[in-house]
Image (cartoon, rainbow, N blue to C red):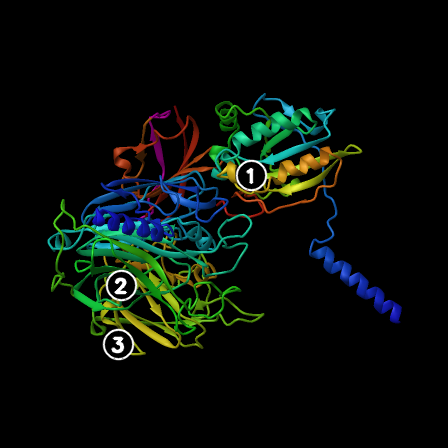
Amino acid sequence: MKKQFFKLIIVSILFILCSFNLIVKEKQVSDFKLKNAKTNKLVSLSDYKNAKGFIIIFTCNKCPMAKFYTQRLNQMNDKYKKMGFPLIAINSMDTLAYAEESFQRMQKKVKNDMLNFPYLQDKKQVVGKNFKASVTPQAFVLLKQNNKFVIKYEGSIDDNAGDYQNVKNHFLTNAVDQLLKENEVTIKNSEPFGCRIFYRGIKDKMK
Amino acid sequence: MKKIFLVSIIALTSSVINAQYSNMTMPQALYGTTFNLNIHESTKQLVTGNQTITGSINNETFWGPTLFINKGDLVRMNVTNNLNESTTVHWHGMHLPAVMDGGPHQVIPAGTLWQPYWTVMNQAATLWYHPHLHTTTQAQMTKGIGGFIIVKDPAETALALPRTYGVDDIVLALTSRSYNTTTNTFVSPPTSARVYGDYMLSNGTPNAQYTLPKQFVRMRILNAEIERGYNLGFSDNRTFYVIGTDGGLLGAPVAVTRLPIHVGERYEIMVNLGNDVVGSSIDLKAYNSGQSQSFPGGEPGTTGVFGSLLNNIDFPVLHINVGATTTTTTPISAIPSSLISNTYWTSADATVNRTISITNGTPGPASVPFNFDNVSYAEATINKTVNLNAIEKWSIANTNPAVFGHSFHIHDIEFKIVSRNTGTAAAYESGWKDTFFISKNETVSFVGKFDDFADSDVTHPYMYHCHFGGHEDGGMMGQFIVTGTLGTNQNENSTSFSLYPNPSSNLLYVNLKDANTEIYYVTISTITGRVVMMLPQPEWQNGIDISSLESGVYTFQMMDKQTKSLTTKKFIKK
């Protein structure tokens, strides 16, 4: 009886811990196939045979917070693609509701901002939902393990969008650097900030 | 030499003192009869570290431009929603047709152009515009979407009042915000239910200072808060003068040393800086310490849903630096003894009496949010029907049992407060009003005339509601329509029409099969269903301007005025 009670306590403690997200089970995401506004071709993670992992950024055309990061993303891809962590940007905004997020406007952004990484359109919002991306910009670091894509970091890119000189925490690049040294990522998530991604059918705010 | 040294010391110390203040933003002034308002997300450096995501209009970074309009003018608004979500824009205090009013029914989807227009019938007053989308009002207000409207008329212009915008006549939108400690985003729904900010923002500026000339100055003050009230006064307790309420100027200035202003209310005040030394300063402060718990922000706590660092304390809302007397405009050196003549309605004028009870809101597990007469807002329910030109007395009772204070606002009209059961209405609130505070255990009565607009429009009713963001989002809102005598044309019209030229590149004309049909609303959508233009009562006889549309196929949906039925046609934009 006493033992059973003890067991119950343990189980409930575990349950509480899990519900408070203290025991983080590493999430996996499945591969996708999305059209690239840079090349007009379909891109999937499996195309990158030699990649160790990926930097995935959910972003969009219009969000002022996302716009702050254009140059930083180009620099990151420059540096980390060579090291096996290419950067891929995904736009999961609802194109039916937001004219400015159309594929044509994405192509325009690629040209104007001279993006050096793929900018994919998630027209059906499937990939965004799979990642549970909530705002733009939102960063994910994936590590390829046994052909599975494990999320090692998710959250903001860094802690200062408007003022690059005063960034104190480079969450995203720190995570990638640690993975490159085959270390555990110490800060596995942070709170992302930016413009909300509204998912059609989930939050009916788009009458 | 000694003098120069002294001056530089003073300059140095004052610059050191001023270092803690930032210069207050004075919103851009827009004049004319056509206004292009582009609502969008923006960012602003409000605290150290990350910028904060804000909502703003045109070139501002928080809040929007001040629109100057003249009584009698036909004004046209081109409102484009460039947010990532739907919104509405309500012209708070404006007397206009319900279909132009911008209430919760006039949803502007993201990316859509809404074109209301109306003839300005209000007298000179300080009004404002803000989002009014049900369940999203608090979040969008928190972002900072809104702006002032200043109505001018000959009666006001004839008076010796300060009116050089940004110089001796300023707008002052008072609100407060809290910031997420890691991302610096505003604390607001849906992630937080907190209602009081921890840090003051004056026209969107933290720790605001402003230089005003050594003479009488005019301040148009708006409480743009979510819930907090401000008991305003100057730091030396000097007397100042209330010259205008929500709906316009008073008959004569009212001298006060304290002025409570609640959510949605506006007061125009004048204060004399003529006896101050140039270079000296004085604070406009909220004397909120010692307020009862029924006064919003009077709660003692600093944490929790109703907690705030600004609760129940005195704090500055504007640090005023006294500058040189103006030379390019004539300085105002006296308070006019009288202002304009107003003829107010009295209780005896009212032919209809209504009582509305504030109900629910008691905290607890099974609690229903605050509402009126135990009925929460429902989009399809018309709660009151008012006859055109009726003079009505509405009594709002917060006694059932009272939990908290509220800010009551009604669309369409300006009214006169005729009684407060806790005593008489204060002299400073004796003018035309559209919003008032109603304390715990209080019943407030007002009389107003529902004139000019009777559309019986159940698809776009007028609203009455508590102006506390969380309360209206929670359903403390009712709707009313104004009905007139029935039109002579009672026959079923054919609502059939054709569009020409088709394809069209600039102007699209409507050819009605039945000339008696009146076009009430036109909605233009892309072939995929995205709404791009919303045109209430369009002036279709001159052609509808579609030049801003990209080329493609569109649907043209017409609602006719009599039956409110919808007919759809397609057209091609070249």
| Dot 1 amino acid type | Pro
| Dot 3 amino acid type | Thr
Q: Is residue B16 above or below residue B337?
A: above
Q: Name which quarter of the figure residue B423 lies in.
A: bottom left
Main secondary structure type of the part rendered in magenta = loop
Percent x, y of residue B552: 44, 27
Percent x, y of residue B293: 43, 73
Residue at 48 percent of width and 71 percent of height = B360
CA gap, disc 1 to disc 3?
55 Å
Front position in the image: A65 or B483: A65
Task: Give the chain letter at badge 2.
Answer: B
Front position in the image: B109 or B353: B109
Residue B549: numbered disc: none
Task: Give the chain letter at badge 1.
Answer: A
- Secondary structure of the residue carrying tag 3 is loop
Residue B376 is covered by the magenta coloring:
no
Per the rendered image, the range of residues in magenta is: B489-505
Q: Nearer the viewer, mark 2 or mark 1?
A: 1
Q: Name which quarter of the figure residue B31 lies in.
A: top left
Residue at 28 percent of width and 55 percent of height = B320
Residue at 52 percent of width and 23 percent of height = A114
On the same chain, marks 1 and 3? The answer is no
What residue does disc 3 label? B424
Q: Is residue B559 left or right of residue A20?
A: left
| Dot 2 amino acid type | Lys
Residue B433: numbered disc: 2
On the same chain, marks 2 and 3? The answer is yes
CA gap, disc 2 to disc 1?
44 Å
Q: Is residue B442 left or right of residue A60?
A: left
Residue A137: numbered disc: 1
